[in-house]
Amino acid sequence: MSRSQETFSKKEVRSKNEKKRKEKEQKRAKKKSEGKKSNFDDMIAYVDEFGRITSTPPDPDKKTVVDAESIELKITKNNPETHPDILRKGVVSFFNESKGYGFIRDLESGQSIFVHANNLLEPVKENNLVNFEIGRGPKGPAAMKVKLFKE
């Protein structure tokens, strides 16, 4: 069986693989001749109270028992008093009427918020002062119920 079709790079790769295989075999033989057997206790690792991995088991004297009944589980409801104004004020920084979308710069946070033409209650133009609510859009926060600000 000849290997005349084999290129230099293929020969090089084949020789590297053979070399790796021989080195692995030698390591296995060396490990076997030393007689060192690995057991489960050598492989186990512990995590201390600070989250660091150690090889020593935890001290049983420092162990604390937690009563499962004393753990309190509760869900806090969103309180409208804890949230800032739902109605926000901002300036239309960009709006493309032909494509039907734009952005509003929130005056309170300075954040740029996406607005779609479907969420407009009145037609808007750039640099208009508007009131809006922030809602969840498909790609992040979006302005909802946008209308011109009137004092």
Image: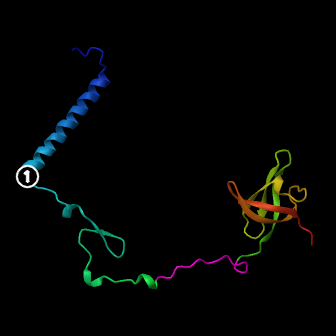
Farthest-out residue, front: 69
* Residue that carries the numbered disc 1 in the rendered image: 34
Give the camera-side residue of 8 and 61.
Answer: 61
Above or below, comparing residue 66 to residue 148 in the picture? below
Q: How is the image coloured?
A: rainbow
In the rendered view, does 58 fall on the left or right side of 119?
left
Q: Secondary structure at mark 1?
A: helix
- x and y, in percent, of residue 5 in the image: 30, 15
Check residue 59 for magenta coloring: no
Instruction: Provide the residue span drawn in magenta.
Output: 71-82
Residue 136 percent location from the top left of the image: 71, 60
Q: Is 117 situated above or below 41?
A: above
Q: Is residue 76 above or below residue 14?
A: below
- Hey, which residue is sitting farthest right in the picture? 151
Q: Hey, which quadrant is residue 39 in on the image?
A: bottom left
Overall secondary structure of the magenta stretch? loop
Decide: few, some or many residues near mark 1? Use Cα within 10 Å; few <14, some 14-19, many ≥20: few
Residue 126: image quadrant is bottom right
Q: Is residue 50 above or below residue 9?
A: below
